[in-house]
Amino acid sequence: MSDAHSPRPPRLIVGQTLFFGADPFVVSAHEAAQHDNRGAILIENGKVAARGSAEALRAAYPGVEVTDMGAALLLPGFVDAHVHFPQTAIIASWGKRLIDWLNTYTFPEEMRLADPAYAATIARRYFDLTLAAGTTTVCSFATSDPVSVDAFFAEAQRRGVRAVAGKTCMDRNAPSGLCDTAQSAYDDSKALLQRWHGVGRLGYAITPRFTPTSTPDQLFALGALWAEHPDCLMQTHLSEQVDEIAWVRDLHPEARDYLDTYERHGLLGERGLYGHAIHLTPREVDRLAEVGAAVVHCPTSNSFIGSGLFQMAALKARRLSVGLASDTGGGSSFSMLRTMAAGYEIGQLAGSALHPAQLLWLATAGSARALHMGDKVGSLAVGSEADIVALDLASTPAITQAAARAGDIWQAVFPTIMMGDDRAITGVWVGGARC
Ligand code: GUN
Ligand code: ZN
């Protein structure tokens, strides 16, 4: 059991620090970030109590316990804004596009999580893998079985992590073993959110999988539930693959577009999270911007399943809230380092090279903001929760020799973003407690 919230003496973590005070898509990297070669973070009772130069904080808090991470870069723990923890074991499954991939690999595996022991095993494995990768907050789809939601939240609670999840609702176009009904989706989701939402660091997201697997009745029922619980997030998928969009058009000829199939059922709002959002029409972009909803970029998934190129520059130019996510197991890595690298590569293919500051911001503050928890995680601002990752910027010979040429922090961190893996993660703190 984590001791993240019990009173403990303050402690100082020392290393290189990099804090963002603003969005580097809006202001320059130089204006957005503050870097200190020898910085420190003071932790007290699971929160950031102070930050500054190591020298100043050591002088201000004499006798405080110090953990010196040397030249490691201290950042907010990564925030993964869209994952499917039940797909942990089917990550890297070969050769299918979205709908075939769901039918061949995903649905059979999700059915297995009806067994509480297996669901608990997968939840444990999932948090082992993500914490080892420096990810301290996730927003996950569960399966349609409430057992999987309980397994996820119980494990998150045991680890003391801030986490969001929801029962994935489906009442058509899926195996009968995974299908619920409009009424049971409403009832089960309501019972789960009453059990878990706001308990410690946990939050509930109302979760229709995507338009093709919910009847209009189910979409309406979940829209009604969201209206009754507007402080919950709502997560789903939007415009991931061209075939999927054509299917949605066939199912909903009355709708203006894919997004409209959600809006008509009460499933568009400021606390809505729309995963993928690749092939958006201008009207959909306008509408998302108008309501202040968030879209979530899932770059390793978008290349792995062959979905397309997310239009980061255009969407950020419209001031859309954008999160970054691994989308495991459609995504091919649990690591937000690998996810940032894929985000960079997709940006290049789409015509804009994302700055390292933009990638790091997306993986921390950007995702936290999309999840409406920017005041709690993702920034290490004083008063926020002390979820921290320490990155070794010389974790392999290839990275070391590339970083050796760096003239500034951005050049020093970029080889780790592009080539780093779990070997770069030298420390992870959750609520101030080291994992
Ligand atoms: N669309 C509907 N369900 C899923 C899923 O599980 N993964 C991905 N990548 N897309 C989806
Ligand atoms: Zn997904």
Image (cartoon, rainbow, N blue to C red):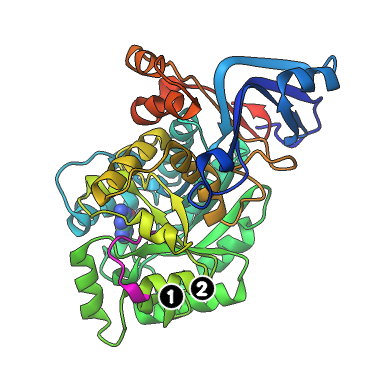
**Badge 1 amino acid:** Arg
For mark 1, give the secondary structure.
helix
- The numbered mark at residue 228 is none
Farthest-out residue, bottom: 254
Give whichever of 420, 327 is nearer the camera: 420
Residue designated by label 1: 287
Quadrant, the C terminus: top right
- The numbered mark at residue 291 is 2
- Neighbours of disc 2 within 10 Å: few (<14), some (14-19), many (20+): some
Ligand 1 near label 1 (Cβ, under 8 Å)?
A: no
Determine the CA span between mark 2 and mark 1. Answer: 6 Å
Give left or right: position of 6 versus 345: right
- Please tell me which residue is depicted at 22% across the width and 49% down the height of the picture: 305
- Please tell me which residue is depicted at 61% across the width and 55% down the height of the picture: 196
Residue 39 occupies quadrant: top right
**Do the numbered discs 2 and 1 sit on residues whose CB atoms are within 8 Å?**
yes
289 over 34 or under it: above or below: below
What's the magenta region? 275-283
Give left or right: position of 305 versus 297: left
**Badge 2 amino acid:** Val
For mark 2, give the secondary structure.
helix
